[in-house]
Image (tube, coloured by chain):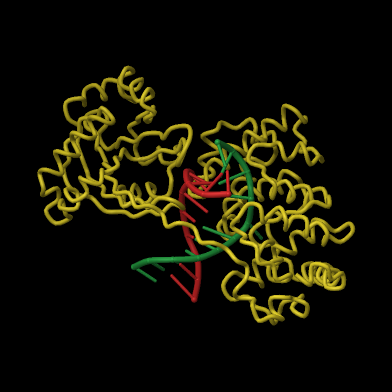
Chain colours: A yellow, B red, C green
Amino acid sequence: MEAINNEVAKAYFSQELLTWYRRIKRDLPWRMNQDPYRVWVSEIMLQQTRVDTVIPYYERFMNKFPTVRALAEAPEPEVLKCWEGLGYYSRARNLQAGAREVVERYGGVVPDDKTAVAGLKGVGPYTTGAIMSIAFNRAEPAVDGNVMRVLSRYFCLEEDIAKPATRVGIEKLAVSLIPEGAAGDFNQALMELGALVCTPKSPSCLPCPVMEHCAARLAGRETELPIKTKAKPPRPEKRVAVIITGTGVNEGKILVRQRPETGLLAQMWELPHLLVPKDRESVIEAAGEEGGLSAAEAGEWLTRSMDEETGLLIRPRRWFMDSDHIFSHIHWKMRIYLADLGAHAELADAAGASLAAETAAAYEAEGKQGEYRWIGPADMETLAFPNLFLRILRDYWT
DNA sequence: TATTCGTGGCA
DNA sequence: TTGCCAAGAAT
């Protein structure tokens, strides 16, 4: 509290942090230059994602889509494929939507205009500030988790940083700290400090360039701050997926489907799967690994449910593997079976690539997946799968 | 405002 | 092994 109104502590913080950053900053691919498009792409990828994870994706993405126009003109599935495994896939679709908007409204040039940038899809308060400051050196705050943690400690702020309102307050503080003409470097310095020194669990205070006037450190409270309410644990969901193996013209292929346009893993491809209702979980559990689908009851339930929900008449053959996957808010405990296609098989074979039109239309009406497709290993290079299914499919094909 | 959106690393 | 977390935005 004291330090907020302490101009000496503030001036010290800004100056020391900026000097420190210019001396030790990491050589990251998006720091090659200040091209607004490169900054923009990096900031989207870095949302809730670690630097080390982002780097290879960033290199590939910039290589494939070097300019706003290249991204705007690309087929969406290619963009999604380039994002495969990175998570939060709406980021990719929003980024491309933003690129198309920049082409249409700003001639393909990212505008040096806060309001215009803030209006782009997928660009929120943080990313707006990051682009404006890093690419254009405008004195805008870029308050992310790092900045909230660093400032909470340095100024001993006790507001809950999990609450949206807290960010607004910290933004005001952050703007007041920006050194004249050095917005980009200073904002990155804040984040660099949070990433390398003022880390969440055990901050390395001794090498910290601003330790002397850090209020939390002086109070011996650096590990207590920031205050952050913990998220609810993900709700468990038992699911059963099937690897349906093709016959005839589809020999060597399996059946996959594309997810709906919105929601979880939107527009990604996946194996067909079902949510196991709470009152059926015991039945599926009983169909253990050893005897394959030993419990005939489980097989019957699977066949009937898959028919009801997808129109696929399957014949479960044997258990293949179990797989756990934890999203931010859901925990999938998935059991995967190998299966053949039953009576409707001719229908799918005849269609070649997809099920009968009327069946597909029925899925649409129910908000279910619209497209099914027989694929071989080579098709994995085109379609974008979330990691949980990539692992299963690699297992299957190797 | 609270929830929904992925994934992997690490103690 | 489990829990926590990371350069957030959209709804």
Quarter of image, res A181: bottom right
In this view, the residue in front, A53 or A273, is: A273
Residue at 21% x, 23% y: name it: A346
Quarter of image, res A356: top left
Residue at 43% x, 32% y: name it: A260
Say whether residue A368 is left or right of residue A48.
Answer: left
Say whether residue A281 is left or right of residue A368.
Answer: left
Tally the marks.
Answer: 0
Q: Position of residue A54 (x, y in %)?
A: 58, 55
In this view, the residue in front, A15 or A386, is: A15
Q: Position of residue A82 (x, y in %)?
A: 54, 43
Q: Position of residue A156 (x, y in %)?
A: 70, 71
Q: Position of residue A277 (x, y in %)?
A: 25, 43
Residue at 67% x, 61% y: name it: A148
Say whether residue A11 is left or right of residue A370.
Answer: right
In this view, the residue in front, A397 or A175, is: A175
User: Eyeballing the image, is A233 above or below A125?
Assistant: below
